[in-house]
Amino acid sequence: MKDTGVDLGITALISASQYGYLDIVEALIAKGADVNAKSKLNRTALMVASMYGHTKVAKTLLANGAKVNIKDSKYGITALMGAAANGHKETINLLIDNKAIVDTSDNRGMTAADWAKAKGHDSIARQLKKTISE
């Protein structure tokens, strides 16, 4: 394999979470993987699982101590923003149930509702705005 010289600091747990490999996620956690480890972009396993709508993986990570409101260092996005931008309603509900801060904003001032709206997920944007007002 050619060495590209790029090291993003992606752990095995982050990679397994991105692809939704629940059995591998569970095995890595059982072996002591740090559920809050961050890549060099400050992304966690929960952030990537949420971005790709892997709700069962996200639920397992949360049950094992994953922090829900970490922001990545490049854009300032959270797991909730990633799930909202990609229209993953079940994952959004899980994150909100686990105390995700709905009205926090990224480095450009966009909230999860703004991300949902910008990506054409209008019903999710409305749901998130309603959650803020409750």
Image (spheres, rainbow, N blue to C red):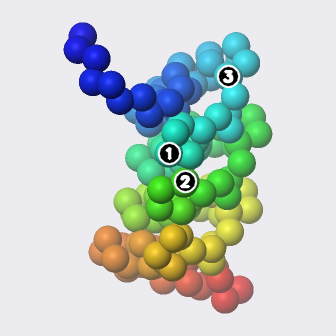
Residue displayed at 50% across by 30% down: 9
Q: Indicate whether 107 appears above or below 58.
A: below
Q: Which residue is mark 1?
A: 41
Residue displayed at 63% across by 77% down: 103
Q: Mark 1 or mark 3, which has the lower sequence index?
A: 3
Q: CA distance from mark 1 to mark 3?
A: 19 Å
Amino acid type at circle 2 is: Asp
Residue 8 position, x and y percent, is 44, 33
Label 2: few (<14), some or many (≥20) within 10 Å? many
Residue in the foreground of this view, choosing between 90 and 100: 100
Mark closer to the observer (1, 3): 1
Q: Mark 1 or mark 2, which has the lower sequence index?
A: 1
Provide the secondary structure element on which disc 3 rests. Answer: loop
Q: Indicate whether 46 appears above or below 128.
A: above
Residue 39 position, x and y percent, is 53, 37
Q: Mark 2 or mark 3, which has the lower sequence index?
A: 3
Residue 31 position, x and y percent, is 70, 13
Residue in the foreground of this view, choosing between 34 and 1: 1
Quarter of the rendering occupied by the C terminus: bottom right
Image quarter of residue 121: bottom left
Mark closer to the observer (2, 3): 2
Quick check: can you spot residue 20? no
Q: Which residue is mark 2?
A: 72
Residue at the far left: name it.
2
Label 3: few (<14), some or many (≥20) within 10 Å? some
Amino acid type at circle 3 is: Ala
Which label is found at residue 33?
A: 3
Q: Are marks 1 and 3 in contact (CB under 8 Å)?
A: no
How many labels sit on residues?
3
Residue displayed at 40% across by 64% down: 85
